[in-house]
Amino acid sequence: MFEPVLTTQTQLEHAWRELMGPWSFGRHSVWMMLIVDDRPLPQLTEIDEAVHPPDAEHLDGLAELLLMLHREVAPGLRVAFLRSRPGKDSVTDTDRAWATSLYAAARRAGVPCEVVHLATRGAIRPLPADVVGIR
């Protein structure tokens, strides 16, 4: 069973590598991992067809979902996001916009957010808030 302890960004990156593997991605997705007591819950949530960053309505919906999960499912949770997409491992403006949106949704919900990660062909890399322009 996959039950790593996740207290550092390095541990989180290793967990994403274990879960996502070294392969390419044929679709644009956002993956959400909920972490409670420094351990991931046993399921990931995939948001499929995540080509374009969310508009205001979708961002509000994600924030509401996170708030509901925090209140009703797992009080004290932290959330971790990973964007996966086909293509090269260079960070695009769309990747930055996705990361900015994911950080914003967590902030609106009052849920701690781990460093957002990007998965592309054979690579997983962090997209820290300061790199995507959040201070």
Image: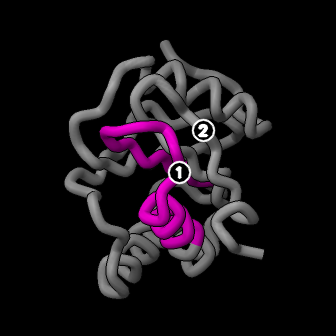
* Amino acid at circle 1: Val
Residue 102 in percent (x, y) is at 51, 66
Residue 16 visible? The answer is yes
Element assignment for label 2:
strand
Asked if residue 119 lies left or right of residue 51, the reply is right
Asked if residue 32 lies left or right of residue 52, the reply is right
Furthest residue toward top = 1
Residue 134 in percent (x, y) is at 70, 74
Q: Residue at x 30, y 32 (%)?
A: 25
134 and 58: which is toward the camera: 134
Precedes in sequence: disc 2 or disc 1 = 1
Q: Residue at x 31, y 85 (%)?
A: 57
Q: Quadrant of residue 9?
A: top right
52 and 59: which is toward the camera: 52
Residue 43 in percent (x, y) is at 39, 35
What span is in magenta?
Answer: 78-103
